[in-house]
Image: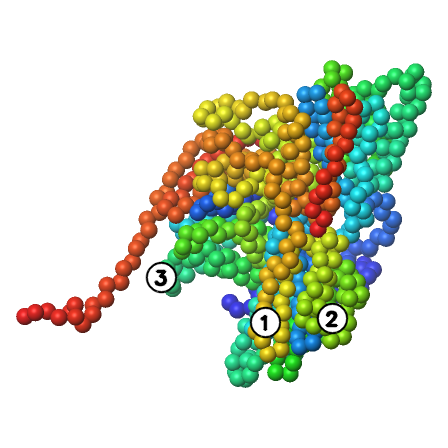
Amino acid sequence: MAGLSFDNFQRNKFLVSKGFGQPMATSTGTTIVGCKFNGGVIIAADTRATAGSIVADKNCEKLHRLSPKIWCAGAGTAADTEMVTQLIASNLELHSLSQRRQPRVITALTLLKQHLFKYQGHLGAYLIVAGNDPTGAHLMSVQAHGSTDIGEYQSLGSGSLAAMAVLETGWKPNMTKEEAMKLCADAIESGIWNDLGSGSNVDLCVMEVGKDAELHRNYLTPNVRSEKLKSYKFDRGTTAVLRSSIHDVLDVEETVITFGNDAMEVDA
Amino acid sequence: MNSTVASEYSSEIHTTPIEHRFNPYSDNGGTVLGIAGKDFAVLAGDTRQVEGYSINSRYEQKIFNVGDDIVMTANGFAADGSALIDRFRNQLKWYKFDHNNKKLSVASSARYIRHLLYSKRFFPYYVSTLIAGLDDEGKGCVYSFDPVGSYEREQCRAGGAAASLIMPFLDNQVNFKNQYQPGSDGTEKKPLRYLELDEVLELVKDAFSSATERHIQVGDGLEIFIVTKEGVRTEYYPLKRD
Amino acid sequence: MSDPSSINGGSALAMVGKDCVAIACDLRLGSQSLGLANNFEKIFKINDKVMMGLTGLASDVTTLHELFRFKNNLYELREERKIEPSTFANLVSSTLYEKRFGPWFTGPLVAGLDKHNKPFICGFDSIGCIDYAKDFVVSGTASDQLYGMCEGLYQPNLEPEDLFETISQSLLNAVDRDTLSGWGAIVYIITKDKVIKKVLRTRQD
């Protein structure tokens, strides 16, 4: 029951050999960045999920919580980033419970890279991992094959070049929190405008040393759709109906009757 | 083993040789649509040109007034599109030289474009072509072509990357498909009528803003060419740029 | 076209209205361009307030329906309560991801009302990535057409009767531009006190 099942693998390989292709998985053709500042670290992401050239989700969440103070941004195959993150988050929790210590960023990174390496790149997860632990603030990234990087500023995903262009121009040592937030948001925006795989809004997560991580969901929303010019509400009865049936839902209400000591007293 | 390339994964070694050859085509995205009205026709298209995940231009004109109050667009592979339009324009010029400046009808233009397209039957122009104008009776008309010259006169047509998103919307809102008279119990179709120009323009703008929301290759700007008996005029509206 | 999820054809979508949700599907089952049946429903009831749509390879649609019925029965026996739509969505997600390296060729949808009768809809890709949406989700061989229709016609806070018209027109016009979908359609409207099922009259080509 536990773990992945390879039951359909054989069948699908057979189908592929017969000339049937694989279906398209939702991918986060994404822009994600991370940047350290004086006293903490920030990660940010756009919110577009695509299936081919169609936008599957206009406001998805690419910032995942690994532990209360360690967050990660994910690019690549959407299901993989989501599931691998959930798995490592739960292992990290168990680990910190058994060790009675706060989880460390390097531990999260090691768990991720060992898991991804085991799958030889078949799990398409590209992550920027960042957070605070007793040893300070950290910013790292891990690729699908299991290789990792450490740096003051990083970007990943299809919009990584657009974002890195902004990071390289704007980054300087010992930035304030506000400067770093602006830099990260600008880098993501660069991906949103210039990379077709990225779009919609900017999500941002600030992890300051000695403070709780704050997630700024939809920190910037530069792509709100303007009102349509016309209402497309139809007159009732426009659609031709052959037959209809109604199923009434009976709401079952439960009331708990407590038999208190007073109520139980029976006069003789 | 007849494998030629060692893959990273032993199970994925290719059993057929990999071909390396020049691919003459690319996809430059974008989308266009044409609607014919009672005494007008519109051709609209977004102004974004893309290649892969990159934007080549946020304003690249792809609808042209080719003369004689005919507007034309060829959407798909941009190089083929402009080559086709240039060829047609040139031929139209020669037609007028040779025939005492006679006006070319939209129907004749359509027939000629078919021959331009079919003459490259085995190395086609990789485009979906639309032309719009007024017919001999002054009614709006739109002609649509497949890449090798099969064509048809229609009331409305969407072409290009987001054609599959826009076309059913047009069926529903222009030709009132699947709509019945309320109270008729689905027996009486909603009567067809010509849409007014301002209704059509609203519809076109909403169709493009919808396509922009869901298709990554559509956006930046919307350019609308309107043909009436007064001539051709254009309107431009910004679209989302993400 | 030769992708297993587009052999049999079929499409589905779900929409949120004012205190209600709607979920609809076509009825076609085919083998490539050959139509086989016009009574293949792709929407399944999980409980009174949760329904799911399953499009894609017909054998996987049937198998997964059985699997989710089984898993939901176990849930109801163990928990002695009805499953919440969001909980069910996570069950679907992990069930699909279990087959990460040999996926089910299907694109499920979940629509329902939670315990506070708040609307919930979501869609999935074939390996279980959840697409939480506030407005509408689509799936199947006419998904492009459905995205175009829904994006054009949808507006928030529709009453059940108006939501029915909007979801029906979205589905009907979308499947008419897809060769692999159509041949009849069914719409369910889920409100807090009743579920309305309507069979639509559609083109038969």
Residues tagged by mark 2 and mark 1 found on one chain of the structure = yes
- Residue B162 placed where, x, y %? 69, 41
Label 2, label 1: how far apart the Cα atoms are: 18 Å
Labelled disc at residue C80: 3
Which quadrant holds residue A42? bottom right
**In the figure, is residue A120 to the left or right of B72?**
left
The residue wearing badge 1 is A213
Image quadrant where one finds the N terminus of chain B: bottom right
The reply to whether callout 3 and callout 2 are in contact (CB within 8 Å) is: no
- Residue C178 placed where, x, y %? 62, 37
Crowding around mark 3 (Cα neighbors within 10 Å: few <14, some 14 to 19, many 20+) is: few
- Residue A138 placed where, x, y %? 67, 76
- Camera-nearest residue between B210 and B117: B210
Label 3 element class:
loop
Q: Residue at x 76, y 75 (%)?
A: A173
* Kind of residue at disc 3: Glu
Instruction: Examine the rendered structure and indicate whether residue C102 appears above or below residue C109.
Output: below
Q: Nearer the viewer, mark 3 or mark 2?
A: 2
Q: Residue at x 61, y 83 (%)?
A: A134
**In the figure, is residue B92 to the left or right of B171?**
right
Label 1 element class:
loop
* Kind of residue at disc 1: Ala
Crowding around mark 1 (Cα neighbors within 10 Å: few <14, some 14 to 19, many 20+) is: many
**How did the renderer colour the structure?**
rainbow
Q: Residue at x 78, y 46 (%)?
A: B58
Label 2: chain letter? A
The residue wearing badge 2 is A153
